[in-house]
Amino acid sequence: LEIFFVTHDPTTLNRQGNDVGTQYRSIIMCHSQEQKDIAQEVISTLDNNGTFNNPIVTEVVDLKEYYRAEEYHQNYFNKNPNQPYCVFSIPPKLQKLKKYFPDKVSA
């Protein structure tokens, strides 16, 4: 959850950067009530300690169905590193990941 909240903006509804629509919403889909409780607790803590300038709008819902993305979406960044979206959007996320979680990143 820490990585999830650091590498995207959980305070904008249905938007990530210039991308707008419900497919860009911040959402956590849970398998159990325990997962939902943990997610809500983390959100509450982050909101209360002022981690972000605005309230977190991440949805926390039960996982009802999950559909694997089409094959061309799998490992998209690795397969398409020069696509404009990848060039613009992915490096800032990787920089945050390396900055805040260096022990979780391999060279």
Image (tube, helix red, strand yellow):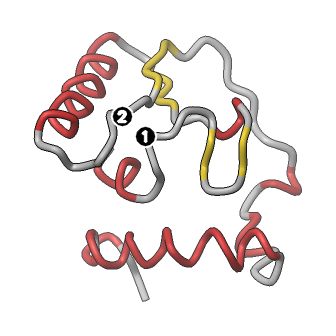
- Residue 15, image quadrant: top right
Which image quarter holds the C terminus? bottom left
* Residue 92 % position (x, y): 51, 74
* Residue 21 % position (x, y): 73, 35
Q: Answer left or right for 87 relative to 1.
A: right
Q: CA distance from mark 2 to mark 1?
A: 4 Å
The image shows a total of numbered marks equal to 2
**Other-residue count near label 1 (Cα within 10 Å), few / some / many at <14 / 14–19 / ≥20:** some
Residue placed most toward the observer, 53 or 21: 53
Q: Residue at x 68, y 24 (%)?
A: 66
Residue placed most toward the observer, 5 or 74: 5
> Which residue occupies the extreme bottom position in the image?
107
Question: In the rendering, which numbered label is found on residue 107?
Answer: none
> Which residue occupies the extreme front position in the image?
53
- Residue 44, image quadrant: top left
**Other-residue count near label 2 (Cα within 10 Å), few / some / many at <14 / 14–19 / ≥20:** some
Q: Answer left or right for 37 relative to 57.
A: left
Q: Disc 2, disc 1: CB below 8 Å?
A: yes
Name the residue tied to disc 2.
56
Q: Please tell me whether residue 92 is drawn above or below residue 56 in the rendered image.
A: below
Q: Amino acid at mark 1?
A: Thr
Q: Secondary structure at mark 2?
A: loop
Question: In the rendering, which numbered label is found on residue 11?
Answer: 1
Q: Residue at x 46, y 50 (%)?
A: 9
Q: Residue at x 48, y 15 (%)?
A: 61
Which image quarter holds the N terminus? top left
